[in-house]
Amino acid sequence: MKKISMRTRVLTGAVAAAALGAGTLGAVSASADTAQTPAVQAAVKADPQNKNLTETTELTVEAATKAAQATLDAAAKAGQHVSVAVVDRDGITRVLLKGDGAGPQSPVSAERKAFTAVSWNAPTSELAKRLAQAPNLKDIPGTLFLAGGSPVQAKGAPIAAIGVAGAPSGDLDEQFAQAGVAALGK
């Protein structure tokens, strides 16, 4: 009788285990494709009147892009080189455009202004005025209390915001942001 080396036995065992595992995985995978679990069925039949659920309104990426482009167009018409950011209700950037000739700091500043505007549902020019009464507001991470951010609202609630940075004044930045908000109403 021929003696089998330890290396051969380990290798043979590993191959057998892999084959068995692949067969089991294939069987489980095949059954998962055809059978719905009770949890999946429950999710499919979720009651929209359930008080545990919430509905939200948000801009589509097409609408966010339209608003961003309208903002850049307003700035270009005024001869300004800016960056524009459109964020969703959670402050997550949906669209960020760095205009030709815009400064290197402008994309980050635009995002922070948009984040600030959506967080407080107010133009950042108004929020900047609140710093006199509450100077610690500026310490909140991700915020920038300079004019140039405008919220986008649906039924009075913030659903997005547009932030602009790069013009010589925050008032101009905010004017361009408001042009982007106005473009959404068209």
Image: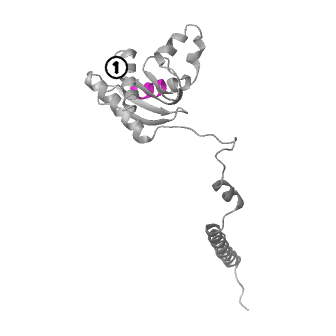
Q: Nearer the viewer, residue 101 or 111?
A: 111
The spot of residue 118 in percent (x, y) is 52, 26
**Can you identify the residue that label 1 sits on?**
167
Q: Nearer the viewer, residue 17 or 82?
A: 82
Please state if 124 lies on the left or on the right of 4 as rendered: left
Q: Which residues are magenta?
A: 106-113
The spot of residue 3 in percent (x, y) is 72, 86
* Residue plotted at (48% across, 18% down): 124
How many labels, in total? 1
Please tell me in which quadrant of the rendered image residue 39 appears: bottom right
The spot of residue 111 in percent (x, y) is 46, 28
Residue 107 inside the magenta-drawn segment: yes
Q: Nearer the viewer, residue 30 or 156?
A: 156
Inspect this view and state whether residue 97 appears.
no
The spot of residue 133 in percent (x, y) is 58, 8
* Tag 1 secondary structure: loop
* Residue plotted at (70% across, 80% down): 5
Residue 97 inside the magenta-drawn segment: no
Per the picture, the main secondary structure of the magenta-coloured stretch is: helix
Please tell me in which quadrant of the rendered image residue 60 appears: top left
The C terminus is located in which quarter?
Answer: top left
Q: Residue pushed farthest front?
A: 49
Q: Residue pushed farthest top?
A: 132
* Residue plotted at (47% across, 19% down): 123
Kind of residue indicated by mark 1? Ala
Q: Is residue 23 above or below residue 111?
A: below
Please tell me in which quadrant of the rendered image residue 20 appears: bottom right
Inspect this view and state whether residue 170 appears.
yes
